[in-house]
Amino acid sequence: MEIITQLVGVIGIIASIISFQCKKHKSILFFRTMNELFFGIQYFLLGAYTGMAMNIVGCIRNTIFTKEISKGKKTILSTATFSLLFVVFGIVTWQGFKSMLIIVAKVLSTVAYGNKNTTFVRAVLFITCTSWLIYNCYVNSIAGILCEAFTLISLVAGVIRLDIIPRLAKRK
């Protein structure tokens, strides 16, 4: 069962790495949703219920944000609603300090995903990935630790490739 649990996380890793190489907000959120879905399943199998609950709510949030942003709607109400939901689910599934890491990470990622600016999304997610990395160490999610390490590398590569290089090219 341990191998299956970690393999579910490997699928989440692949989705995460792909997400930050995408140029469009919709694509980033699609692959982030896949990442959260597979890690939600893995956290359930590990008994890490805060991580599971946060990822399942995150899937719903990502789907709603994708629709709102593609229609040009403001996400202020959704951002506030999902931030509150993450706090409530974090309290209901409280497992100590590690739960606080995830509450903060999910509220920050909610603010990021509600913003169409992909540069802002990548910058804020650097902080949230670091929180998830620490959480994964607490709950012994080997795939989660690897995922966040790869995600952080992918984020840096995405920032350089999609944010920094194009800006430097415009200055010339």
Image (tube, rainbow, N blue to C red):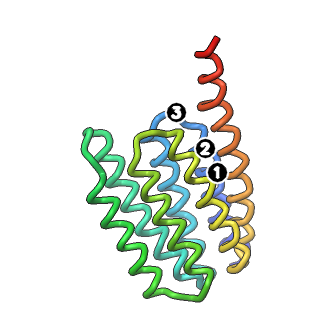
| Callout 2 amino acid | Ile
Q: What's the distance in space between the residues labelled 2 and 3, CA to CA?
A: 11 Å
The residue carrying mark 2 is 18
Pair 3/1: label in front: 3
Which tag, 3 or 1, sits closer to the chain's start? 1
Percent coordinates x, y for residue 17 in the rendering: 64, 47
Q: Classify the position of the C terminus by image quarter.
A: top right
Amino acid type, callout 1:
Ile
Answer whether labels 2 and 1 touch (C-beta < 8 Å). yes
Horizontal and vertical percent for residue 125? 57, 53
Q: Nearer the viewer, residue 83 or 140?
A: 83
- Residue shown at 58% from the left, 47% from the top: 123
Mark 3, residue position:
23
What residue sits right under mark 1 in the picture?
A: 14
> In this picture, is 19 found above or below 144?
above
Q: Give the mark nearest the N terminus, 2 or 3.
A: 2
Q: Amino acid at mark 3?
A: Lys
Secondary structure found at label 1? helix
Disc 3 packing (10 Å; few <14; some 14–19; many ≥20): some
User: CA gap, disc 3 to disc 1?
Assistant: 17 Å
Q: Nearer the viewer, mark 2 or mark 3?
A: 3
Query: Which residue is depicted at the point 64% across and 37% down?
Result: 159
Res 99 → quadrant: bottom right
Residue at image position (25%, 39%) is 71
Please tell me how crowded label 1 is: few (under 14), some (14-19), or many (20+) other residues with Cα within 10 Å.
some
| Disc 3 + disc 1, Cβ < 8 Å | no
Q: Which mark is residue 172?
A: none
The Cα atoms of the two marked residues, 2 and 1, are separated by 6 Å
For residue 168, what is the image quadrant?
Answer: top right
